[in-house]
Image (cartoon, rainbow, N blue to C red):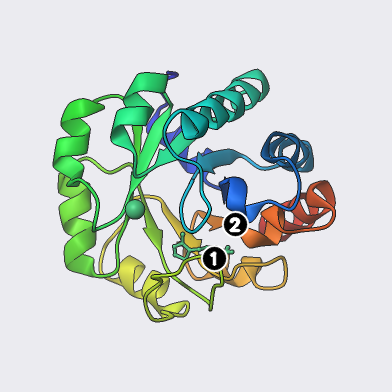
């Protein structure tokens, strides 16, 4: 694990790519390499939903993707699975409100980057108290990538969090594309996180480049 400082984490959040095997049209390792060439700054392995890998197969894929990230100097974050994150010595873990509580994750992974999905100011304050490094907010726009996604929040959730004094790094998530990415940043987010705009693109590298241009 590489231990990152707060200002480094903030920079890495700029173009945050999330995926698992079921999100990709091509081999996930190839997809990740192309996305890195296109300019992504952070990666989250999120192996979830119908047809996703489990057990040893999931671990093997995680190891391959971790290697790709290490070689490129990009932090490798694991979604939900704290045990796997600890076992692989990942750079970070991302959890939602339905997962292991953030303070307990912090106990198991003291130095990892910790991201928490939040939907209310109360959840955000609790996550910050528990040691979150950044917050994920969304779905900002309609998404096809999460079966149990909540109601669309729009950009107002980001604006409201900022107005209410939430100053830690924020990434927007849900339905973000190169056409709306700039709006998410302008609403107050430090970065955008997304699955399908990159994972399901015919040309992953070009899609990543287009998104990068939209956020810098
Ligand atoms: N959490 C809220 S929306 C979402 C997650 C994991 C899915 C984002 O995927 P996409 O394809 O970028 O809309
Ligand atoms: Mg989760």
Q: Secondary structure at mark 2?
A: loop
Nearer the camera: disc 2 or disc 1: 1
Q: Is residue 93 above or below residue 87?
A: below
Name the residue nearer the viewer: 123 or 66. Answer: 66
Q: Which residue position is annotated with label 2?
A: 195
Badge 1 residue CB within 8 Å of ligand 1: yes
Q: Any mark on residue 197, and which?
A: none
x and y percentages locating residue 156 in the rendered image: 41, 79
Name the residue nearer the viewer: 72 or 6. Answer: 72
Q: Label 1 neighbourhood size at 10 Å, few (<14), some (14-19), many (20+)?
A: some
x and y percentages locating residue 129 in the rendered image: 15, 47
Q: Secondary structure at mark 1?
A: loop
At 46% across and 52% down in the image, what residue appears?
Answer: 48
On the question of residue 115 being in view, the answer is no
Mark 2 in CB contact with mark 1 (< 8 angstroms): yes
Badge 2 residue CB within 8 Å of ligand 1: yes
Q: Using the numbered discs, state the Cα–Cα distance from disc 2 to disc 1 in whole angstroms.
A: 7 Å
Q: Quadrant of the N terminus?
A: top left
Mark 2 / mark 1, whichever is N-terminal: 1
Q: Any mark on residue 145, and which?
A: 1
User: In the shown orientation, is residue 102 left or right of residue 140?
Assistant: left
User: In the shown orientation, is residue 85 left or right of residue 103?
Assistant: right
User: In the shown orientation, is residue 35 left or right of residue 162?
Assistant: right
x and y percentages locating residue 72 in the rendered image: 67, 24
């Amino acid at each position: 694990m590489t231990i990152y400082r707060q200002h480094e984490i903030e920079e890495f959040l700029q173009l945050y790519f999330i995926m698992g095997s079921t999100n990709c049209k091509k081999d996930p390792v190839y997809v990740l390499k192309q996305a890195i060439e296109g300019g992504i700054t952070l990666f989250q392995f999120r192996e979830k939903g119908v047809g996703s890998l489990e057990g040893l197969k999931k671990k093997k894929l995680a190891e391959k993707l971790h290697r790709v990230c290490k070689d490129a100097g990009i932090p490798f974050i694991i979604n939900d699975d704290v045990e796997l994150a600890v076992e692989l010595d990942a750079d970070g873990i991302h959890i939602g409100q339905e997962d292991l509580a953030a303070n307990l994750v912090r106990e198991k992974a003291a130095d990892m980057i910790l991201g928490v999905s939040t939907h209310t100011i109360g959840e955000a304050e609790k996550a910050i108290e528990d040691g979150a490094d950044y917050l994920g907010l969304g779905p900002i726009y309609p998404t096809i990538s999460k079966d149990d996604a909540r109601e669309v929040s729009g950009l107002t959730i980001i604006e409201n969090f900022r107005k209410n004094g939430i100053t830690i790094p924020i990434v927007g998530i849900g339905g973000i594309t190169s056409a709306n990415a700039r709006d998410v940043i302008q609403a107050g987010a430090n970065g955008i996180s997304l699955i399908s705009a990159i994972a399901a693109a015919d040309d992953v590298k070009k899609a990543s480049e287009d998104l990068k241009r939209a956020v810098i």
